[in-house]
Image: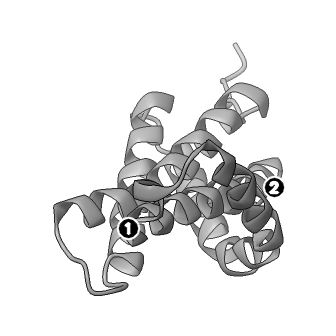
Amino acid sequence: MKRYLVFALVGPFVGGFLLLMTTTYQSGYWAEAHLGEVGKLIVVFFKTLQYSYLFGFLPSLMIGAIDDILLHVRRIGPVLRMLLVGLLAFVLAAFTYGSRGSDSGAVQLILYGLVGLVPAMLSSWLVHHYVEEPRPATAAS
């Protein structure tokens, strides 16, 4: 249960921030903006945070479920699990957000893919380090 709570709290927060950063970069906002504009970006992030959780809650829980399934595969260690979960989230986010707007290409695909990769790997890492994982049962001797 704690695993899903971590994914539900961290995923939309980090993913929403990265999505905001990606869309501002794609729009050309940073080409003419200066350091004083960062405050406006933070205000917009906190005003839209409720929508990040509204639309990012279920995808984060689905990635958490995949992480939970991979936890029960004995041959998959924590690092490989983080990489597999991150790769899947990268692909899903790239296809979900990659077709937005008129731009297309490798830069857009990578930027939107990172919107899924970073929160998934961060959540998986946090779960691995701070949530107790079930240990395999041992036979009594």
The reply to whether discs 2 and 1 touch (Cβ–Cβ < 8 Å) is no
Q: Is residue 102 left or right of residue 105?
A: right
Mark 1 is surrounded, within 10 Å at the Cα level, by few (under 14), some (14 to 19) or many (20 or more) other residues, namely some
Q: Earlier in the sequence, mark 2 or mark 1?
A: 2
Spot occupied by residue 19 in the image (x, y as percentages of width and height)? 54, 64
Q: Residue at x 47, y 69 (%)?
A: 23
In the rendered image, the residue lying farthest to the left is 105
Q: Is residue 132 above or below residue 40?
A: above
Q: Residue at x 60, y 34 (%)?
A: 125
Spot occupied by residue 138 in the image (x, y as percentages of width and height)? 66, 24
Q: Name the residue under label 1.
A: 26
Q: In this view, does 111 lie to the left or right of 67?
A: left
Q: Residue at x 55, y 56 (%)?
A: 18
Looking at the rendered structure, the secondary structure element under dot 2 is: helix
Q: Is residue 3 above or below residue 107?
A: above
Spot occupied by residue 87 in the image (x, y as percentages of width and height)? 35, 52
Q: Name the residue under label 2.
A: 5
Q: Is residue 112 above or below residue 136?
A: below
What residue type is disc 2 on? Leu
